[in-house]
Image (cartoon, rainbow, N blue to C red):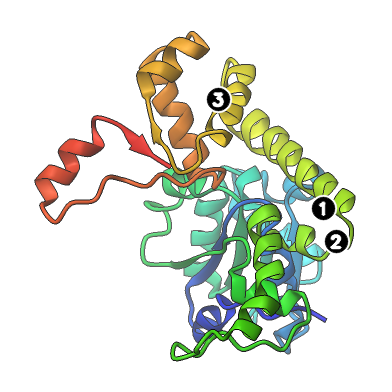
């Protein structure tokens, strides 16, 4: 049985809207699970779930004439004479998909549920072509509240007025230590042993590098991006020195900034900009360095 995620209460509000619902976030945060949950929830047989990581499935959409795509989808069982629901998982693998989605929304009133692991991709290809036709929901690793749910505890930490007694602290402390040490990836949280958790984290890292950096990044020097990832992993919570990183990796400042932007846009890191109540000061500071 699926564990309910906090973001789902926001998605629920738009199930009946005509706009496409886009779930984005880093790999292994639960996007596909949520997409399949809503696929099962839709009480209509005129629906289709397609995993675009499968190169065979991508071919259904690789037509210049979109009416031929319609024929392909009809072959798979959809009837466009009535409301159709299309669930597309891992949309980042098809760069022409935004215009296809727009066509079917405008001409056949099709409801789309989409997932993609790269906001970098969405910002570059989705904003213009699907303006006014989509709602985007970002999913992240589990919050501590969700973590406790996945650990099958009944602890209620939603009460803002909760007084943390010594007994409550002693109960939650080892769970919080585990959460801080291994993070909130559902796949990792559900593992029992330390070895399983470590292997799962390693697999997530390798999967991200191969599918996001190598396949989608289109960088000439993937090894440099890999080395940058390791450098940044040692600098969590610290200010980033672009000049120092540039010299260490032997690449230009511009390249470092492009790599960091990509890693931020694909959810590997989160850039925290310098904060100031003065907007002009904040912008000036942000040009001098980045924090993570």
Indicate whether 51 appears above or below 45: above
Question: Which of the pair 272/137 is nearer the observer?
Answer: 272
Whole-number angstrom distance, CA of label 1 to CA of label 2: 6 Å
Q: How many marks?
A: 3
Indicate whether 10 appears above or below 53: below
Residue at the (65%, 70%) spot, across then down? 173
Mark 1 = which residue? 197
Q: Are marks 3 and 1 in contact (CB under 8 Å)?
A: no
| Disc number lying in front (3 or 1) | 1
Query: Secondary structure beneath disc 2?
Result: loop
Indicate whether 41 appears above or below 78: below
Q: Which mark is residue 228?
A: 3
Identify the mark nearer the N-term, 2 or 3.
2
Q: Are marks 1 and 2 in contact (CB under 8 Å)?
A: yes
Identify the mark nearer the N-term, 1 or 2.
2
Question: Which of the pair 200/26 is nearer the observer?
Answer: 200
Q: Which mark is residue 191?
A: 2
* Residue 175 placement (x, y as % from top left): 70, 69
97 on left or right of 283: right
Quadrant assignment, res 261: top left
In which quadrant of the rendered image does the C terminus lie?
Answer: top left
* Residue 56 placement (x, y as % from top left): 82, 45
Whole-number angstrom distance, CA of label 2 to CA of label 3: 29 Å
| Mark 3 nearby-residue class (10 Å; few <14, some 14–19, many ≥20) | some
Residue located farthest toward the front when viewing the structure as drawn: 166
Identify the mark nearer the N-term, 3 or 1.
1
Query: Secondary structure beneath disc 1?
Result: helix
Question: Can the viewer see residue 35 in this picture?
Answer: no
220 on left or right of 178: left
Query: Secondary structure beneath disc 3?
Result: helix
* Residue 253 placement (x, y as % from top left): 37, 17
* Residue 118 placement (x, y as % from top left): 55, 47
């Amino acid at each position: 049985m699926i564990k309910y995620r906090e973001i789902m209460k926001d998605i629920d509000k738009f199930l009946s809207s005509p706009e496409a619902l886009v779930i984005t976030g880093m790999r292994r945060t639960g996007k596909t699970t949520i997409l399949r949950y809503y696929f099962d929830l839709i009480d209509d047989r005129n629906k289709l779930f397609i995993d675009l990581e499968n190169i065979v499935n991508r071919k259904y959409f690789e037509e210049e004439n979109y009416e031929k795509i319609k024929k392909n989808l009809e072959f798979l069982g959809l009837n466009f004479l009535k409301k159709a629901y299309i669930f597309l998982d891992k949309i980042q693998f098809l760069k022409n998909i935004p215009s296809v989605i727009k066509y079917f929304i405008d001409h056949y009133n099709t409801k789309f549920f989409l997932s993609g692991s790269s906001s970098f991709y969405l910002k570059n290809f989705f904003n213009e072509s699907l303006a006014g036709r989509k709602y985007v929901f970002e999913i992240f690793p589990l919050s501590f509240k969700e973590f406790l749910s996945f650990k099958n505890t009944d602890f209620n930490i939603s009460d803002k007025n909760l007084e943390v007694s010594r007994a409550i602290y002693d109960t939650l402390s080892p769970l919080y230590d585990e959460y801080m040490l291994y993070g909130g990836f559902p796949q990792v949280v559900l593992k029992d042993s330390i070895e399983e958790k470590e292997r799962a984290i390693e697999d997530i890292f390798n999967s991200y590098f191969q599918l996001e950096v190598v396949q989608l990044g289109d960088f000439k020097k993937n090894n440099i991006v890999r080395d940058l990832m390791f450098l940044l992993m040692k600098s969590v919570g610290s200010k980033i020195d672009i000049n120092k990183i540039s010299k260490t990796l032997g690449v230009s400042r511009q390249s470092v900034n492009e790599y960091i932007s990509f890693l931020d846009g694909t959810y590997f890191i989160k850039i925290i900009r310098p904060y100031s109540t003065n907007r002009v000061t904040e912008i000036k500071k942000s040009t001098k360095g980045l924090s993570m």
